[in-house]
Image (cartoon, rainbow, N blue to C red):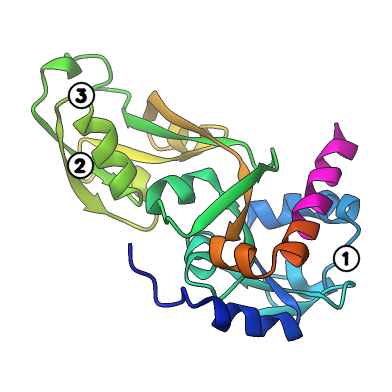
Amino acid sequence: MDLPITDPAALATADAGPLILAVPKGRILTELGPVFARAGVTPAQDLIDEDSRRLRFESSDPGLDMVRVRPFDVATFVAFGAAHIGICGADVLMEFDYDQIYAPLDLGIAKCRVSVAEPVATAGRDDASRWSRVTVATKYPNITRRHFAARGVQAEIVSLSGAMELAPSLGLSRLIVDLVATGSTLKANGLVETEVIAQVTSRLIVNRTALKTQPERIGAWIARFRNALAAAA
């Protein structure tokens, strides 16, 4: 994939300022607190404040600033060089598969899974091995297509960014593919998890070009997060 920021000189220029760490809003950010503490860095207090209008935040380390973005956007910020490093779910990496991203560490937080679900009323009543195509509502079109294609099934995608659980009952799709943690939302909407596509945890990710042009600075942060994981263990 061609990316607009692949010029080593462009990223090397950033050496004069702080590195940028992209973090996602929501559950992952909430669970990052202890990880940051063990890594010896304290974010600005309003980083986890969803009402804060700021998007870029200083940290206790003058060599690191943080930007808070949507979970699905973290990988894009890092792949295109807008952020040097980032933290995002493995589901995002699977969906976008950017070749400019290196994921050296599994942080082991925000555990969940990408799963197939369908209405309780129809689950198990049909032989899925005989399907030739199926309609699926999801925000993971690439993961979904690959999963069903491996079984010789064509997945017709209904792209939704939220409220996937409504799709089967309203006739938009037969199945959904979504991120599942406890399964309570599925149950509340008359759905049952029928298959797990992938287990998901959060990963530390790095822009490959930044790693080549600033190996000592980026490597130092990888080491700090690795030590944080060791301390937790």
Instruction: Please tell me whether mark 2 or mark 3 is closer to you in this view.
Output: 3
The residue stretch that appears in magenta: 221-233
Closer to the chain start, of discs 2 and 3, is 3
| 181, 204: nearer the viewer | 204
- CA gap between label 2 and label 3 equals 19 Å
SS category of the residue bearing label 3: loop
Height in image: 27 above or below 123?
below
Height in image: 141 above or below 230?
below
Residue at image coords 69%, 38%:
108
SS category of the residue bearing label 1: loop
- Which quarter of the figure has residue 202? top right
Q: Is residue 152 left or right of residue 203?
A: left
Q: In the rendered structure, does residue 162 fall within the stretch colored magenta? A: no
Residue of label 2: 173
Assess disc 2: are there few (<14), some (14-19) or many (≥20) residues with their C-alpha within 10 Å of its C-alpha: many
Residue of label 3: 151
Instruction: Please tell me whether mark 1 or mark 2 is closer to you in this view.
Output: 1
Residue of label 1: 42
Residue furthest to the left: 132
Q: Is residue 174 left or right of residue 147?
A: left
Residue at image coords 80%, 59%:
220
Q: Amino acid at mark 2?
A: Ser
Q: Amino acid at mark 3?
A: Arg
